[in-house]
Amino acid sequence: MTSEPVRPVPRKRVLFDVDGTLIDAVDNQRRVWETWAGQYGLDPEEVYRVALRTRPMETFAQVAPDHDPQACLAALHALEDEDVRSGVYGAFAGAAELLAALPRDSWALVTSNYERRVRGRFARTGLPVPPVVVDAAAVTEGKPSPVPYLLAAERLAVRPEDCLVVEDAPSGVLAGLRAGMVVWGVNGSVAAPGVHRHFASLGEAAAEIAAFAGAEVEVGRG
């Protein structure tokens, strides 16, 4: 009698967004954009409203079409770098325990920010940084394009369908869905369109995120 060949169990990986998912930086982002708007004599509320749903260069085209977009970007980057050095922010409840419980090769960060800022914020909040970080400089198309998440799966050497995307923003959710991945939403009272599951907080989702990657974690819900 011949035995059936043993098929390997697909490796599961978790791809985390950063701002709004692991790091609570909403107030920081608002202050940065308000300061930037003040430098250009623009309405800070209108600028922030546009910035929430577009990438920086698209924001500049809408709110400051008469200004050099590269100069606008340089001013924004200077403010964001200063925020990393001196801003007050923290990790969401459950983030530290969850990331510490995950094997280092089982997760990645996929962010619209830049890796140096992510590393600065993680250092200040005590969060570990995984080997794979896909940032704004790594891709030519940002979220909601699937390109950032597909690149993360490629770097982790796994199939997109074996990845779990953890996101807080509709554009990131859409990026994960377009990549053909499982997408869970966190940190919001209302689920983003299309998410497979939604949790009011990261802490509430932590145990199940860990289980997806074959790990265990115990955290307080928050």
Image (cartoon, rainbow, N blue to C red):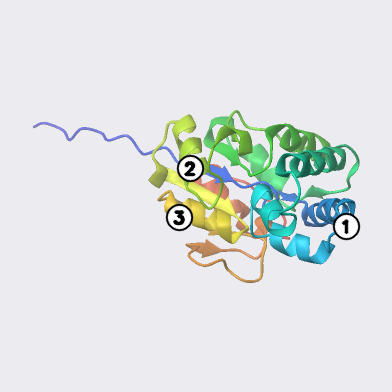
Classify mark 1: residues with Cα within 10 Å, few (<14), some (14-19) or many (20+): few
Sooner in the amino-acid sequence: mark 3 or mark 2: 2
For residue 101, above or below residue 93 = above
The quarter of the displayed image where residue 46 is located: bottom right
Sooner in the amino-acid sequence: mark 2 or mark 1: 1
Tag of residue 177: 3
Give the distance between the C-alpha atoms of the residues marked 1 and 3, in whole angstroms: 38 Å
Secondary structure category for the residue under label 3? helix
Secondary structure category for the residue under label 2? helix
Give the distance between the C-alpha atoms of the residues marked 3 and 2, in whole angstroms: 11 Å
Q: In x, y percent, where is residue 171?
A: 57, 57
In this orientation, does residue 20 appear? no
In which quadrant is the C terminus drawn?
bottom right
Classify mark 2: residues with Cα within 10 Å, few (<14), some (14-19) or many (20+): some
Give the distance between the C-alpha atoms of the residues marked 2 and 1, in whole angstroms: 35 Å
Three-letter code, disc 2: Val
Q: Nearer the viewer, residue 88 or 73?
A: 73
Identify the residue position indicated by label 2 in the image.
Answer: 147
Q: Nearer the viewer, residue 45 or 106?
A: 45
Residue at screen point 73% across, 64% down: 49
Mark closer to the observer (1, 3)? 1
Classify mark 3: residues with Cα within 10 Å, few (<14), some (14-19) or many (20+): many
Mark closer to the observer (2, 1)? 1
Identify the residue position indicated by label 1 in the image.
Answer: 41
Residue at screen point 8% across, 32% down: 1
